Image (cartoon, helix red, strand yellow):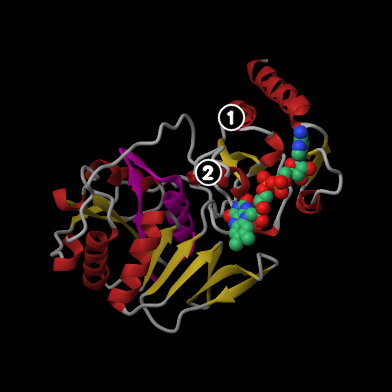
Amino acid sequence: MSILVFLEHHGNELQKGSLGVLSKAATLGDSEVAAALVGGGVRALASEAGKFGATRVHVAEDDALEPPLPQARVDVLAKVVQDGGYDTVLFANSVLAADIAAGLSARLDAGLNWDLTDVESRDGNLIGKRPALQDSVVVDVGWRSTPRLALFRAGSFDAAATSGGEPEVVDVSAEYEAHSQSAKVVSQEQEQASGPSIEDADVIVAGGRGLGAPENFTLAEELARALGGAVGATRAVVDAGWYPYSAQIGQTGKVVSPKLYVALGISGAIQHKVGMQSSNVIVAINKDPNAPIFEFSDLGVVGDVHEIVPKLTELVNQRKSG
Ligand SMILES: Cc1cc2nc3c(=O)[nH]c(=O)nc-3n(C[C@H](O)[C@H](O)[C@H](O)COP(=O)(O)OP(=O)(O)OC[C@H]3O[C@@H](n4cnc5c(N)ncnc54)[C@H](O)[C@@H]3O)c2cc1C
């Protein structure tokens, strides 16, 4: 198998999700694993990719690739896949990566399996693992032809550095399709963030309507800060304008699988559940002992978030300083 992993970066940092996919690819045995870095000033990130298992890194640096738009990246990846003869292209899910994967699938007439949580090599075939029926079962999925494209759910793999050496760096200069240049980024706003993003966080503290008021989200923020995590939210509070849409977890928000998910005042509606139930450990605090969230929590605390959360945060902070 010859695998290409698309590495997404923000600023000077490679995204943990794509490094996780790269680490996984490197364990697939007998596979040649390369990475693609696309954007402005990305060359410096190539050796980092080597540490996570890439033996070759295709680097496309161009002003046209500076804005985080998918189409020009599709042009680059199509060329890399065709010139390099890659039979497999892997992506870690993000808004940008999903657009690129879909575009590349159309361009190369290639099958794309999305929302995968794992992959394995069986008798030389690649088998994807895809949760189905609201995550109650995991099904094996395959591809009828190459190249095979796959998009993995956020948090599917840990980014594990290998003892890999310096990768070979290959420059890519792609020609852009006329339509690839027709979209322009007019302005970009940077959301102030003081911690990991929801997609990258090992710990998510999510708040629901049980917090009672928008200002009480500080409870979630302080606990998240203490645990080194990110803050998530239910749709009910996002719709009410208590917290930004980017934090929404669930069917119409983000699907996450952190190591620890702490749910504060969240009922556990099915549309929320499908966005977080594959988290490793779920802790719920809810004053209603019959709240549905307790049916799929590893640890449930029946009580008032206003009483419990400040004490919990204090305990975590004490433990950290002790
Ligand atoms: C098509 C569709 C798509 C949807 N997509 C999503 C989605 O992506 N994500 C999502 O989250 N929802 C989604 N929803 C909405 C979903 O159905 C629920 O309405 C929503 O998740 C409920 O949010 P909540 O848990 O914050 O609020 P509620 O259901 O009102 O629950 C609040 C909980 O807080 C508890 N509580 C109250 N006070 C306290 C206190 N002081 N201390 C402790 N606990 C307390 C209550 O017991 C209750 O269990 C969708 C709905 C539809 C129809």
- Quick one: label 1 or label 2, which is nearer the N terminus? 1
- Please identify the residue farthest to the bottom as the structure is shown: 144
Tell me the quarter of the image containing the C terminus.
top right
Quadrant housing residue 55: bottom left
Kind of element beneath mark 1: helix
Above-or-below relation of 185 to 313:
below
The image shows residue 134 at horizontal and vertical percentages of 66, 66
**Left or right side of 264 for 29:** left
Tell me which residue sits at (29%, 43%) in the image. Answer: 45
- Please identify the residue farthest to the front as the structure is shown: 240
Above-or-below relation of 231 to 296:
above
Q: Determine if the magenta segment contains residue 6.
A: yes
Task: Out of 118 and 115, give the one closest to the viewer.
Answer: 115
**Left or right side of 255 for 95:** left
Task: Out of 199 and 167, give the one closest to the viewer.
Answer: 199
Specify start and end residues of the magenta stretch as a single range.
1-30
